[in-house]
Image (spheres, helix red, strand yellow):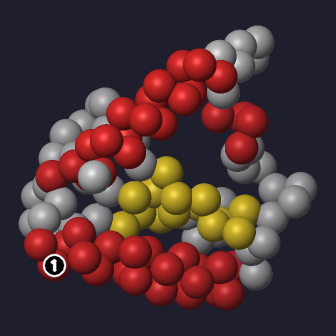
Amino acid sequence: MAGFGHLEPKRHIPHLTDLDGPEATTLGAVLARVTSALKMATAAELVYVYVFGERVAHLHFNLAPHSAGDALRGGPGLLERGAQPIRAAELARVSRQVQTALN
């Protein structure tokens, strides 16, 4: 599809969790700038940003412009058919652990 591409850091970084310093600080601004330009150039309704890391230990952000009726499946299409919702207690437990780690 037109505009599908990827963005990657200048140095080799295995995973998102390995970003440090200026890379981590500027990531949001860079993603916003690039996806805005991509959205405008393709007249997309939105741009999905995917990060998958289990196959190759090299960080890159897949950028996928999307408009209704195109070939891209996003949102619920990322889940297996029949996937069961996570129990509220498990969601709350994970949320608490993340909050604790960030504090």
7, above or below 59, in the image: below
Q: How many marks?
A: 1
Residue 81, image x and y in percent?
75, 17
59 relative to 22 in the view: left or right: right
37 relative to 61 in the view: left or right: right
Question: Which residue is depicted at the point 78% across and 72% down?
Answer: 45
Residue 29, image x and y in percent?
40, 83
Question: Which residue is depicted at the point 31% across and 30% down?
Answer: 54
Which quadrant, please, contains the N terminus?
A: bottom right
- Local secondary structure at mark 1: helix
75, above or below 41, in the image: above
Of 60 and 100, nearer the camera is 100
Question: Which residue is depicted at the point 47% across and 25% down?
Answer: 93
28, above or below 92, in the image: below
Q: Residue furthest right?
A: 69
User: Can residue 58 be seen?
Assistant: no
44, above or below 61, in the image: below
Mark 1 is surrounded, within 10 Å at the Cα level, by few (under 14), some (14 to 19) or many (20 or more) other residues, namely few
The quarter of the picture where residue 12 lies is bottom left
Residue 89, image x and y in percent?
59, 19
Q: Which residue has dot 1 on it?
A: 22
User: Can residue 61 be seen?
Assistant: yes
Question: Which residue is depicted at the point 15% across and 52% down?
Answer: 18
100 relative to 51 in the view: left or right: left
> At label 1, which amino acid type do we have?
Pro
Residue 65, image x and y in percent?
65, 66
